[in-house]
Amino acid sequence: MSQMNEHILNQYFDDQLSPAERDAFEATLREDAEADAATQATMNELTQIGALLRAQHQREVAAADFSGFMAQLEARLPAAPDPVAATPERVASPETPRLSLLGGLRRFLFPALLGAAVALLAVFVLDRRATPSPAPEASPEGPSEVTVKAVHNQGNQTVLISMPAEDGGATVIWMLDEEEDPSDPLKGEDPI
Amino acid sequence: MNFGFAPLFAEAVLQLTDHDLVSRSREGDPEAFRMLVERYQHRAYGIAMGVLRNPADAMDAAQDAFVKVYKNIQNFKGESAFYTWLYRIVVNVCIDHIRKHKKRRMVEYDDTWRRRDQAEFTPLTGNTRAMQPNIALENEELSLVLNEALSTLSENHRAIILLREVEGLSYEQIAEVMDCHIGTVMSRLHHARKRLQKALKPYLEASGQIDLAQRAGAGVRKRA
């Protein structure tokens, strides 16, 4: 039997031929006794192979233990998606390194900027005093060395401090504020 | 006191279609997802076992597939049947698994069949026609020959012949599951059958008489 006829036989066996194709194929078998016998033999074998595969499949599934399947699966499932937390930009995972960039900025860049601002303040204080004092907080004179022109609370994380500089300008410094005091009398004032 | 709620509940669950359960799962109903798993865990495992030929790997693959279903159920639009979508996930998980472990698996197969070739078997005196297939498979030799023949097929060929012979999917559904052209399905199915015919020839009965009117669709399997 040619490969083309074998393909057609498979389709015939699986009932995937159109009615016209099926009629034409059966007409061929009626006219050719040899092809008819070969077709019948092949279909018999395919039927037995299918039965063996199904029996094998049933044995394999029956041998499996599903008693812990659901419990194991539930242990692996992520928590029910939260409408806010499930937003992709908020999910940091190894599979989505691109999304962790914003988190990195928040985590590292902002504290670095804050640290730089504090360092700038220290340099400013040292420069004003012209003494080798190691750090502003170690200075016994403290705030008396710095003239603060205005302080403006910008929220619970940031405060603007304006000071007169030697060239007549102003220096702005960002600082952390642990708790915002709603009764802060300076709130809302423009220091500059 | 039995008010008969349990049978009523069971009947109600049976009446819930896959579409109902998928819709509820998408709305975050964990019980609906649990019902989907219970409805399809055996089939998912069966397909994975058919492709991977290893019970532990098949159980892992079935679990992986349902985790993917859970994570992606919002993306399932319902344009195809749930089970074809699930089968596609299962097959993809299995193929990924084989690619990752191909080298190790080849060694395992070689060792397995070398050991089994050395074992003594009682020769078959009958044939599969005279016996029921499940009884015929109790003969270890036939079971091993079938396993060996399946293991010589590629994972794609194994998946296709299982989807056809065990799950009873149409060519179009198999093409959807395997993400390939229907012509590829026909070609692979033909190849897989030829390979199994050749391997199992000594165990298959010679042709009997099937009336021509009963031949068309003789291999059709309806999904349970």
Image (spheres, rainbow, N blue to C red):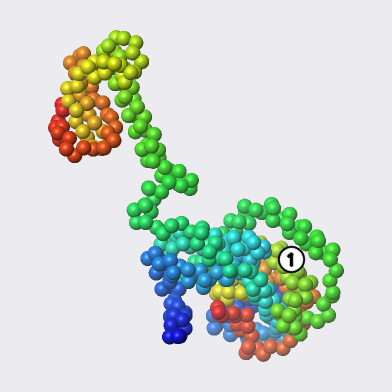
Rendered location of residue A88, percent (x, y): 39, 50
Mark 1 packing: few (<14 Cα in 10 Å), some, or many (20+)?
some
Q: Where B91 falls versus A147 (above or below)?
A: below
Provide residue B86's location: percent of width, then percent of height.
51, 66
> At 41% across and 44% down in the image, what residue appears?
A99
| Amino acid type of the residue that numbered disc 1 sits on in the rendered structure | Glu
Whether A28 is drawn above or below A81: the answer is: below
Q: Is residue A184 left or right of residue A100?
A: left
Q: Is residue A133 visible?
A: yes
Given residues A159 and B192, the one toward you in this image is A159
Q: Quadrant of residue B90?
A: bottom right
Residue occupying the point 38% across, 54% down = A86
Asked where in the image residue B192 lies, by quadrant, the reply is bottom right
Task: Determine which residue is flagged by label 1.
Answer: B148
The one nearer the camera, A184 or A3, is A184
Residue A4 visible: no
Residue sitting nearer the eye, A109 or A99? A109
Of the 4 image quadrants, the one containing the C terminus of chain B is bottom right
Q: Residue at x 58, y 76 (%)?
A: B168
Q: Position of residue B84 (x, y in %)?
A: 51, 69
Q: In this rendering, is residue B89 above or below A16?
A: above
Residue A63: x %, y % from top left: 66, 71
Position of the N terminus of chain B by quadrant = bottom left
Q: Residue A190 vs residue B119: left or right?
A: left
Please tell me how many numbered marks the rendered image carries: 1
Q: Secondary structure at mark 1?
A: helix
Q: Residue at x 36, y 29 (%)?
A: A112
Label 1: chain? B
